[in-house]
């Protein structure tokens, strides 16, 4: 590609600085973190140019600009993953699919996250969360919430998506391998012994081997609607769409789903716990809601079967999870590449440039949210409904044809975690002050958030 302006277009280039030769502004970005984008946005406006990780980039903030990018998928822009990510996720992943193939794959996946499928996953998710909270509470020491939430979301993904029931030791081993994979998904694509890229490939091959073994040994339940995990649903959905998923596709798809769920859900779980600690009045209001609908009685959660519809009917819980995802959107934005020159905010985005649409900055600068920095779940209540102005002001799960496929699953998971925390746990911050947050690769506290869990009195 060429990273120069499109001379046939009369519009000016976005303002901004390209930094030093080759490295551009990568070092500034690395050291300044989230402050990097905020400072440049203040200086240059909502659409500015920079040079990060070896490539020129146009960073885009603001609901209307983001709408144009996201709705322009397949016409103005397309996906643009670094080479290491594309190779490690594989040619059959959604990340690497475009056009009709992407549409067809999403259609097959849609059933995996349908209401009916979620209902069948619910008891398993609840069980994984309860087991985890029991372990946290029995630990005499404070928990590193972010690290343990990563383990929790990985465990949830193995059980719910793949139906794996593995021993603690196997789980530990798979988790270590998966961490090696995740740490090297964004690495320089240099395939040499000891390079991060080679480490990532080795981790991917090892994960694929374990997944293939488990798939071959696993009884599949694709008869009727009595699914036991997402893999069953995926196979049935493929059949309904007259597609046979080959083993390689299955392996790549499952690794991609776990990858997409892992850090994002762990980040959101940590932010949720942090906000419940910071705002006891919010926790009390949630408990009040659980009491009023009979889910919490005498300080204990009623352990009867929890239905998806009862969870969905909890309005305050819904507002609270939405607010956590607004203020602490785990993913800061998404990468695309311009397939033709187009206009944004009166400047040109030339063909061939990378474009990053921003989620967190868009939330932080949106005029539709009153007192934008306050944690205020009621802003999403039916009376106030601050996000009614349009969906691109609030987009923790992205938008358009590449919006998050696991949105409903992630939301259900977070709601169940909040219910268990409100109903069955006592927990206290184990440090004097709340930690600082960093936003790369997903938003998380610098010290992981140290919390002591006590369980029920
Ligand atoms: C895509 C956020 C959980 C599966 C995305 C995107 C965002 C996002 C912002 C769009 C990225 C882009 O535009 O490039 C989140 C957040 C989560 C979460 C904040 C948790 C709180 C999950 C879970 C799964 C999942 C649990 C699956 C089990 C996916 C997939 C895509 C995606 C497959 C790619 C869709 C495509 O390319 O068509 N997610 N996600 N996500 N997410 Fe999530």
Image (cartoon, rainbow, N blue to C red):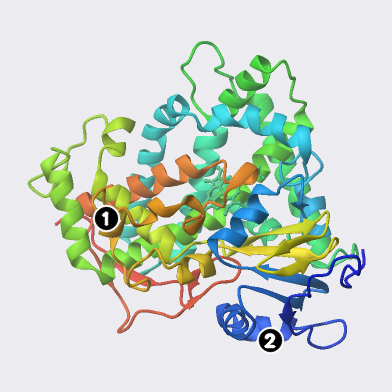
Q: Which residue is mark 1?
A: 384
Reply above or below: 144 against 239: below
Is 243 or 196 nearer to us in this picture? Answer: 243
Q: Position of residue 109 (x, y in %)?
A: 61, 31
Is 332 or 417 nearer to us in this picture? Answer: 332
> Depth-wise, is mark 2 or mark 1 nearer the camera?
1
Give the distance between the C-alpha atoms of the residues marked 2 and 1, in whole angstroms: 39 Å
Relative placement, left or right, of 82 versus 239 is right
Residue at the (26%, 34%) spot, across then down: 310
Label pair 2/1, CB-CB below 8 angstroms: no
Locate the C terminus and report the quarter of the image it occupies.
Answer: bottom left
Residue at the (64%, 28%) spot, across then down: 107
Q: Position of residue 24 (x, y in %)?
A: 80, 83
Query: What crowding class fits label 1: few (fewer than 14 Cα within 10 Å), some (14-19), or many (20 or more)?
Result: few
Give the mark, 2 or 1, whose residue is nearer the N terminus: 2
- How many marks do you count on the picture? 2
Relative placement, left or right, of 436 versus 89 is left
Is 391 or 89 nearer to us in this picture? Answer: 391
Reply above or below: 404 against 58: above
Q: Residue furthest left?
A: 298
Q: Is residue 321 visible?
A: yes
Q: Position of residue 255 (x, y in %)?
A: 67, 43
Q: Is residue 141 visible?
A: no
Q: Position of residue 317 (x, y in %)?
A: 28, 49
SS for tag 1? loop
Q: Which residue is mark 2?
A: 28
Residue at the (88%, 67%) spot, across then down: 6
Reply above or below: 234 against 315: above
Corner quadrant of residue 296: top left
Query: What crowding class fits label 2: few (fewer than 14 Cα within 10 Å), some (14-19), or many (20 or more)?
Result: some
SS for tag 2? helix
Relative placement, left or right, of 88 versus 456 is right
């Amino acid at each position: 590609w060429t990273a120069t302006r499109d001379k046939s277009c009369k519009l000016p280039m976005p303002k901004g600085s390209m930094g030093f030769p080759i490295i551009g502004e990568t070092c500034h970005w690395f050291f300044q973190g989230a402050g990097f984008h905020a400072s440049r946005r203040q200086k240059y406006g909502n659409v500015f140019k920079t040079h990060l990780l070896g490539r020129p980039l146009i960073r885009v903030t603001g609901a209307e600009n983001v709408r144009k990018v996201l709705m322009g998928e397949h016409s103005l822009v397309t996906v643009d993953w670094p080479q290491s990510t594309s190779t490690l996720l594989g040619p059959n992943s959604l990340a690497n699919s475009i056009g009709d193939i992407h549409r067809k794959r999403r259609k097959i996946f849609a059933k995996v996250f349908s209401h009916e499928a979620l209902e069948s996953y619910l008891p398993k998710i609840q069980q994984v969360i309860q087991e985890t909270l029991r372990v946290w509470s029995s630990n005499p020491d404070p928990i590193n919430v972010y690290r343990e939430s990563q383990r929790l979301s990985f465990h949830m993904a193995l059980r719910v998506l793949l139906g794996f029931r593995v021993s603690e030791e196997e789980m530990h081993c798979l988790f270590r391998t998966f961490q090696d994979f995740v740490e090297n998904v964004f690495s320089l694509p240099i395939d040499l012994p000891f390079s991060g890229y080679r480490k990532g490939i080795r981790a991917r091959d090892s994960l694929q081997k374990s997944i293939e073994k488990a798939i071959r040994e696993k009884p599949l339940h694709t008869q009727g609607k009595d699914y036991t995990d997402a893999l069953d649903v995926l196979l049935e959905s493929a059949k309904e769409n007259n597609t046979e998923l080959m083993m390689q596709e299955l392996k790549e798809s499952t690794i991609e789903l776990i990858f997409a769920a892992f850090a994002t859900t762990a980040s959101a779980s940590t932010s949720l716990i942090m906000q419940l600690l910071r705002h006891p009045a919010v926790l009390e209001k949630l408990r009040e809601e659980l009491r009023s609908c009979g889910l919490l009685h005498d300080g204990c959660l009623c352990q009867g079967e929890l239905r998806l519809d009862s969870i969905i009917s909890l309005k305050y819980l819904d507002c609270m999870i939405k607010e956590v995802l607004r203020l602490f959107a785990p993913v800061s934005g998404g990468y695309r590449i311009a397939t033709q020159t187009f206009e944004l905010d009166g400047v040109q985005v030339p063909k061939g440039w990378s474009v990053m649409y921003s989620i967190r900055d868009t939330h932080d600068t949106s005029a539709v949210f009153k007192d934008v920095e306050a944690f205020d779940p009621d802003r999403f209540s039916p009376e106030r409904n601050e996000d009614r102005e349009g969906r691109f002001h609030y987009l923790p799960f992205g938008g358009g044809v590449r919006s998050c496929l696991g949105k409903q699953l992630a939301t259900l998971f977070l709601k169940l975690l909040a219910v268990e925390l409100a109903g069955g746990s006592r927990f206290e911050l184990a440090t004097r002050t709340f930690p600082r947050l960093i936003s790369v690769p997903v938003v998380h506290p610098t010290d992981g958030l140290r919390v002591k869990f006590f369980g029920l009195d």
